[in-house]
Amino acid sequence: MENGMTKYCQGCKETLPIYAFGIDRSRDDGLNRRCRVCIRTRQRRVIPLTPKPKPNSILRDSPRDPLERVRWAIDVVGVRSRDELMNLLRHPSFRQDDVMDCYATLRLRKEVRRLA
């Protein structure tokens, strides 16, 4: 901090008012090293702006048969873990036991890959 009302941003290399910085309690001055604009710009470069489709809209296109739905989630959607599979197929008519039973059946038949 240069004085009580401004701070140097390490991202854009400018001296800005302290209200341009977010809170970071782990730092001595209690503020981030970069201003909010620099942080937002960096996040937009790292995280694409296209939103992921919501699970409900994904499920509308999924098959109705439980075995086919689990196969579809693994092959088409590309879930990588059992937790992702459970979150995607969370539905009142499709219990957790049903999902895992279908997954186990497909694994025994060697029709789907192993999930983490």
Image (cartoon, grey):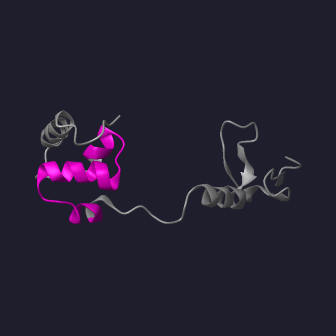
Give the residue furthest to the front: 110
Majority secondary structure in the magenta region: helix
Residue 51, how many percent across, how many down? 45, 64
Residue 108, how many percent across, how many down? 17, 33
Assess whether residue 10 is covered by the magenta stretch: no
Q: How many marks?
A: 0
Give the side of residue 114 with respect to residue 23, left or right: left
Give the residue furthest to the right: 2
Q: Residue 61 lies in what quarter of the image?
A: bottom left
Quadrant for the C terminus in the image: top left
Nearer to us in this view, 109 or 84: 109
Nearer to us in this view, 113 or 84: 113
Rendered position, 113 above or below 67: above
Question: Residue visible at 74% across and 51% down?
Answer: 34
Residue 94, how many percent across, how many down? 13, 49
Residue 99, how many percent across, how many down? 17, 43
Q: Which residues are magenta?
A: 57-86
